[in-house]
Amino acid sequence: MFKKPFFRSGHKEKSSQQHFEVEGQRLSSDVQVNIQSIIQSFVNTGDLGQRKIDHVGTLMYLDSLVDQDKIEKSVIKGLTLSDHFLSDSQTVDNLDDVITKLLNGFSILLRDDFQKAYFFNTGGFTSRAVQEPSSEHIIRGSHEGFIENLSTNIQLVRRLVKNEKLVVKYMEFGERSNSKVAIIYIDDLINNEILVELEYRLSYSKVGYIQSPGYLLEFIEDESFSPFPQMLSTERPDRVAANLMEGRFALISEGSPIALVAPINFFAFFQSPDDYNSRFYIGSFLTLVRLMSLYIAMVLPALYIAVVSFHYEVVPYEFMLTLKGTLEYVPIPPIVEAIGMAIILELLSEAATRLPSPIAQTIGVVGGLVIGSAIVEANLVSNSMVIVIALTAIASYTIPVSEMSTTIRLLGFPASMAASLFGFIGIAFYVTLLLIHLCKLESFGQPYFSPIAPLKLEENKDTFFRFPIWTMKNRPSTTEVKDVRKMGNPRGWKKHE
Amino acid sequence: MNEKSITLNQLFFVIVQAQIGISLLSIPFKAHKYAKGNAWISVIIAGLIVQIFVLIIWMLMKRHKGKTILEISQTVLGKYIGNLVNFSYLLYGVLVMSNVVILYADIIERWILETTPKTVMIFLIIATGIHLGKQNLRVIARFFTIVNVLVFLLFVLSFFAFSNNLSFTNLLPISQSSFTDMFKGSTQVTSALLGFEILLFIFPFVLGQEKQMLKKMTSAIATVVIIYLYFAVLTLATFSQKEIAIVPEPVLYMLKGLNFRVVERIDMIFLSYWIIPMTTSFVVYLYIASSAAGKMFHKGKRKYPVWYLSILVFGIAYFFSDAIQIQTFNHYTAVISLIFIFGIPLFLLLLSIIFKNRGIRA
């Protein structure tokens, strides 16, 4: 699958050796020296607190990261009451580790004539409560969403997957920000080659500051210039858990509620957890509607343009008269109409996203009603074009993952242009190019357009229709999982009736 | 070689898609010239002939496991003559590519975009072809597989044609043309079945036993022949003898006659999407020509030949514009192709049997 996994893994070790690992400065036996070097390391920052405790030593911490209550109630109380409170296992002996501990909200106790420092977990962070992610609303199913706290996020996943093989691997990125990133996977499912490839790619991600997982995504995705997202970003723990169960991995970083899931395929962007919580007819119907909306959002304006500017004969005579009637007084060519309206639509949605919700409603009214009707009355845009663009917008918003829905709308622009140049032929060429691209695209070495290309008929139970869950007995073969079987025979009781 | 392997099912779809293309639209027209109402028998005969060709190719490939025709020619004929054969395949690829592009641009001009310059169409076709042709075999096979949806679509559309006044008596009597005429007709159909020669180039990259492959190859040829037969019978029943003699694309005319209330001229929408199977025919020959060129000049890499061969094709296609030139070109291509799908493989097979695979030099 990957060209040279062995070479790659060897290469990986080599590059990690190059990674600078300066032997940390050891702590001295003199408390004052240690305190001074810590203060210097933090360049006299204002929030570096220290507290002298009689007969014990000096306690240091970063004010902004610790919970004062914890220090008072457990650490200081414990230290003054009992001599056995300190344990040698909770010590560090060099300056770098001390700094790391302090940065993570620990308190450090320095003692005279002792070349080590004790540490206590006194971290106190405020974080948002777990609530439903606003970008991925569902009707039936879990309403939990990830938050900005990494350990809470991992907890949310672990609560859904109570399995000892669920592995969390922490890595740090950003040499100036030390952002913590967790790779989560299920060890007895995931294909090792995918993990090797992931770590190999991540080993190149050396930057000063990782602002969000989006940074990492752009570093490690297969094709940077592809319009399609090659990792699924989601805020839903149930979605992450379901994907882990299919042999994928998730990347969650501290300070961001987004989990990145890979290797992913195209059709995963059109599925919603809702589908599995309702009857399979409903699930199938909705999946079909979404895939139809994919087509509408991408080529409906293009089809319209092709019909009105090239192929009048395709539509029946009466219908053509209606179309002609709406177009008669519009002076501008259809392609300009289409692109203009599409841009207005993007402006409206962008404005509504940024504004607080009461004002956003105003935007809806101004945009939808005022612009919509006024623009037609002023004969700037035809009635039918307004309908087409509105349909396009609605269709694109039905796609459950917002990233994909924007991509699809974006891909509509070239389609419209191709249609205005060559009519149906232009659209067909454009669709061909996109399909070729999709066939070529891979996500972590796994085909992106599976199970359509390469075609695996038996795995298409969840692509266009959602078959009853008990028919999907195997995991998808594209992730090359170690354990293919997903379930036994849940409807076996039927035989014994 | 730096090609990726494909599965048996992908082999099936590659062969089907390599054959189905522009010629499906005009299937009984050419055969009808000779065989009249028996054009459908010509289709069956052509299928049998092609099956023999495929058998020869299979026997050749089986004798030389893991080798493409480009390597077999060198083993059997020696380096220089072998290279000559390989170069002739390159020229053959370019020739058929040009033929496909010319026919393709012509049909688009006649049916959909009457005023758009042909050069623009040729450019679009070749650009799409390059985009697919430069990918590795696995990606090409994946794409060929999904294209079959369109064949399925054509089937669905063709069911509506049963609402026309079909007169299956057009197919009778069988005595309306002699056997020689039927055979002449079948040579015309054979050119519509071209494309299976890609086997000579992809055989070693297929994962599977030789026998399984023969089964897949046979079933692919059979599938295509059945599809052709179906459309031949349907169009022969739709159009009378006199009508079919003047419609060069009977399948399209048949669709044109359908009325769906909401959509008229379904043929135009269909033909627009049918450019995708037409592109696959182009890509098949681009693959053949570029692997030959890659083998000879670029250490097996197809990356560069894909570009310069396509530019060459663009040049050739540019000069053929009027209908008579196109017909002549098409005719000669069909004749020449026999050498490459039948002559050379048979010759190599006989030589390798005589010399027991060791080649002339040994």
Image (cartoon, rainbow, N blue to C red):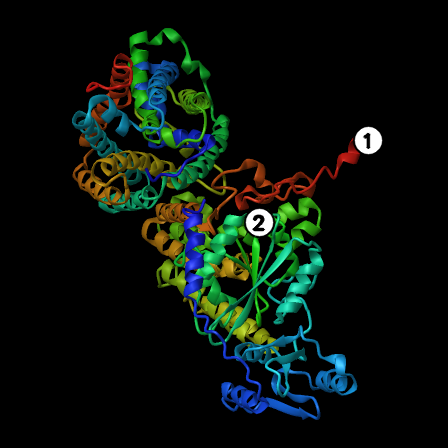
Q: Position of residue A362 (x, y in %)?
A: 57, 76
Which residue has dot 2 on it? A190
Q: Earlier in the sequence, mark 2 or mark 1?
A: 2
- Residue, x 57% and y 75% (percent of image)? A360
Q: Which mark is residue B223?
A: none
Q: Residues within 10 Å of mark 2 (few under 14, many from 20)?
A: many
Looking at the rendering, which quadrant does residue A122 occupy? bottom right
* Callout 1: chain: A
Give SS at disc 2. Answer: loop
Image point 83% across, 32% down: which residue? A497
Q: Is residue A390 above or below residue B272?
A: below
In the picture as drawn, the residue positioned furthest to the right comes out as: A497
Helix, strand or loop under label 1 = helix
Which residue was labeled with disc 1? Answer: A496
Question: Is residue A58 something one can see in this rendering?
Answer: yes
In the displayed structure image, the side of residue B113 where residue B329 appears, left or right: left
Q: Position of residue A7 (x, y in %)?
A: 41, 50
Foreground of the two, B93 or A109: A109
Q: Is residue A131 above or below residue B43?
A: below
Percent x, y for residue A211? 49, 72
Residue type, mark 2 in image: Ile
Q: Nearer the viewer, mark 2 or mark 1?
A: 2
Q: Are marks 2 and 1 in contact (CB under 8 Å)?
A: no
Report which quarter residue B142 is drawn in: top left
Q: Residue at x 40, y 62 (%)?
A: A339
In the rendered image, which quarter is residue B271 located in?
top left
In the depicted view, which residue is nearer to us: A480 or B90? A480
In the rendered image, the quadrant that contains the N terminus of chain A is top left
Give the chain letter at badge 2.
A
- Kind of residue indicated by mark 1: His
